Image (cartoon, rainbow, N blue to C red):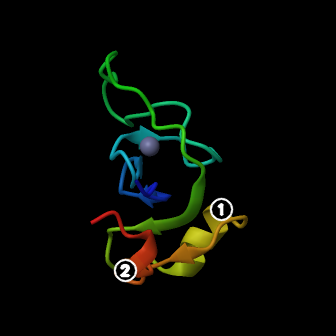
């Protein structure tokens, strides 16, 4: 079984983990807490605990430079530029 990498996916109002699809904090190094942005997370939900290896977005028009400014410690990829091995689908 291969472990899918976790990538921070920055959205308009929230940040998600690409591995489990649940909300996370944009400054988090590992997916250890759930942040939904809006509303209360489902108490049955659990973060996957995976380390984030990159930052990306699904929003067109957001540049890698903007993402890099958010997380200078991670490789940043604009929408559609995420390398195949980091894609979740
Ligand atoms: Zn996760």
Describe residue 9's horizontal placement relative to residue 72 as left or right: left
Q: Mark on residue 61?
A: 2
Give the mark, 1 or 2, whose residue is nearer the N terminus: 2
Describe residue 60's horizontal placement relative to residue 77 as left or right: left
Q: Is residue 9 above or below residue 72?
A: above
Image quadrant of residue 85? bottom left
Which residue was labeled with disc 1?
71
Tell which of 19 and 58 is nearer to you: 19
Give the image quadrant in which the ligand numbered 1 is located.
Answer: top left
- The quadrant the C terminus occupies is bottom left
**Horizontal and vertical percent for residue 49?**
54, 37
Q: Is residue 76 above or below residue 24?
A: below
Q: Is residue 41 above or below residue 49?
A: above
Describe residue 48's horizontal placement relative to residue 42 as left or right: right
Residue at the spot x=61%, y=43% of the render? 30
Q: Badge 2: few (under 14), some or many (20 or more) residues near its Cα, within 10 Å?
A: few
Q: Badge 1: few (under 14), some or many (20 or more) residues near its Cα, within 10 Å?
A: some
Residue at the extreme top of the image, as rendered: 43
Residue at the spot x=57%, y=54% of the render? 52
**Horizontal and vertical percent for residue 44?**
31, 17
Give the SS element for disc 2. loop
Residue at the spot x=45%, y=31% of the render? 34
Tell which of 37 and 82 is nearer to you: 82
Q: Mark on residue 12?
A: none
Give the SS element for disc 1. loop
Image quadrant of residue 43? top left
Image quadrant of residue 23? top left
Q: Is residue 85 above or below residue 26?
A: below
**Horizontal and vertical percent for residue 61?**
37, 80
């Amino acid at each position: 079984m291969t472990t899918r990498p976790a990538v921070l996916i920055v959205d308009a109002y929230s940040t998600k983990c690409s591995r489990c699809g649940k909300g996370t904090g944009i400054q988090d190094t590992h997916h250890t807490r759930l942040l939904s942005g809006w509303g209360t997370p489902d108490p049955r939900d659990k973060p996957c605990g995976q380390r984030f290896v990159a930052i990306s977005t699904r929003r067109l028009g957001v540049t890698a430079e903007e993402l890099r400014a958010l997380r200078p410690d991670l490789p940043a990829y604009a929408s559609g530029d995420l390398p195949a091995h980091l894609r979740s689908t």
